[in-house]
Image: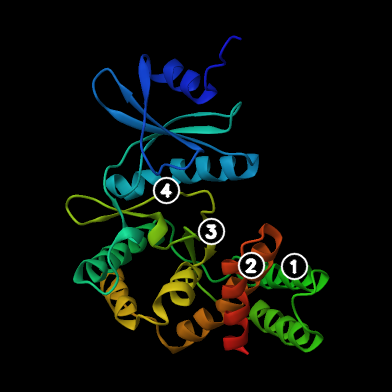
Amino acid sequence: MIAVEDPRLVFARQTLGPVSAVSMPGLPPHLLALVDVHDIHYVVKRHTDSGRFRQETHAYITVGPHLRDRAPRMVATDPGTRSLLLTFLPGLGAADLPPGTSAERDVHRSAGATLRALHQVVPGNPGDGISAFLAERIRLWVGRARVAGLISAPERRTLLACADALAVTAMDSAICHLDYQPRNWLVGSDGRVHVLDFEHARLDARIRDFARLEHRHWRSNPHLRQAFFDGYGRSLDEPEHDLLTRFGVIEALTALVRGYQSGDLRLAAHGRTLLDQLF
């Protein structure tokens, strides 16, 4: 039987010339690590969803240059295999740092500075329809949760009322990462945080980029919240903090429904617990 060569490797060789695959323990299967004849390392990331591929490609083109060495650089793309060829960034995954240490606080401080750089790429504009878009997202997830039997009738009414209120709430927009949390942070040898995975990145409500951190990481570790905003350059004012709490609704619903659909009991439990805490 003739072996079929990995199409990601074929794509990389067409772009870079001779390259070899490198074994890297812990690397997810959709990522392929490579090295060329000059000992320069790369990663090929392959998407299964064409929309995510286009979104991440657009993000690396428009946002990547502004982040400079805080994010990988996109070398080439292959729409046929939905693959991106990226420069390799060495470092330690922030999620692997021991909790409760000064190193963890330092990483959150640096991550705040990195997110500030991302948010400054496009000046915020409160009149771009983000509020109505996010309200509709809540209604969509409420509908999915109701069909799956994951929420009660009173919860549905409360959640839809939240969506109606959010639809008329003014909020600043920015280019957002939308999965900004330690699993997507890489700590370089200089201690600075590099950010990975821009497949969700788009113009959105600026405060949303804090929601996953707030509701998954900071509630039991407020010192990390303070370190993060020290790096970001300013804390949230009272209206922004209230908005962050409202975005917990989106976090709770998406976790509840996606956890249920994928059989991820831990994710579903997080969504259920957060929903109970919010109401």
Sooner in the amino-acid sequence: mark 1 or mark 4: 4
**In the rendered structure, are the residues bearing label 3 and label 4 in contact, judged by CB atoms less than 8 Å apart?**
no
Residue 43 image point, x, y percent: 40, 34
Sooner in the amino-acid sequence: mark 2 or mark 4: 4
Instruction: Tell me if residue 170 can be seen.
Output: no
Residue 29 image point, x, y percent: 50, 38
Q: Which residue is mark 3?
A: 203
Residue 62 is left or right of residue 279, and the answer is left
Q: Disc 3 marks which amino acid?
A: Leu
Q: Which residue is mark 2?
A: 254
Sooner in the amino-acid sequence: mark 2 or mark 1: 1
Q: Secondary structure at mark 2?
A: helix
Q: Secondary structure at mark 4?
A: loop
The numbered dot on residue 140 is 1
- Nearer the observer, 141 or 98: 98
The residues tagged by marks 2 and 4 sit, at their Cα atoms, a distance apart of: 26 Å
Sooner in the amino-acid sequence: mark 3 or mark 1: 1
